[in-house]
Image (tube, grey):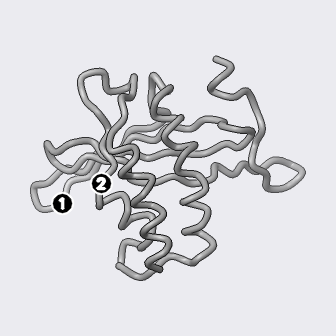
Amino acid sequence: MTKFKDQIKKIFNETKEVSCPSFPNEKVVFNAKGINHLIYKGNRSRREESRILTNIRLLPKAIKVLKHMAYPQEETSYSREEVTYKFWTFEAVVDDRRIKVIVRQVGRGKKHFWSVIPAWRKDRFGILNAKKRSIEED
């Protein structure tokens, strides 16, 4: 468990924050909230080891997505106890794999990296990770 956290921390420390064209006047920060979400579920139980390893493998791709995406594909929010939680989802193909990257903002705080997941698609042939044009080709 510590080795996973150390691997994620290393990537976060090397990145610290990125400029994202979707948020021209703000940076997306990589902080402890994102680290914890990559390792733990909402109820603070640890994610499966395979999911944590997938998160670690996809992190560099998530950083690429945030640096290139001009618009989020989804925006959602909810409020709890007078605090608004906002989420932006970016979906792109990086190195032949479609991924979703989620940025979160709590109240008026800084936008921070929240999660990265493989973006699986279903078609008539089954479930696949779609291979389409890469963000580098745009």
User: Is 47 on the left-hand or right-hand side of 29?
Assistant: right
User: Is 85 on the left-hand or right-hand side of 99?
Assistant: left
Please provide percent x and percent y for residue 22: 38, 25
Going by the numbered disc 2, the residue's amino acid type is Asn
Q: Residue at x 59, y 67 (%)?
A: 53
Closest to the observer: 11 or 104?
Answer: 11
Q: Which mark is residue 80?
A: 1
Please provide percent x and percent y for residue 61: 57, 43
Q: Residue at x 38, y 62 (%)?
A: 35
Question: Closer to us: mark 2 or mark 1?
Answer: 2
Q: Residue at x 20, y 54 (%)?
A: 79
Above-or-below relation of 14 to 5: above
Closest to the observer: 94 or 86?
Answer: 94
Closest to the observer: 30 or 89?
Answer: 30
Q: Which mark is residue 116?
A: none
Extreme top residue here? 138
Could you say whether the residue bearing mark 2 is in a helix, strand or loop? loop
Q: Which mark is residue 31?
A: 2
Extreme left residue here? 82
Above-or-below relation of 57 to 88: below
User: Is 13 on the left-hand or right-hand side of 60?
Assistant: left
Q: Residue at x 49, y 27 (%)?
A: 69
Going by the numbered disc 1, the residue's amino acid type is Arg
Please provide percent x and percent y for residue 85: 25, 51
Q: How would you rate the neighbour count of disc 1 (Cα within 10 Å): few for under 14, some for 14-19, many for 20 or more? A: few
Picture quarter containing residue 32? bottom left
Please provide percent x and percent y for residue 26: 25, 29
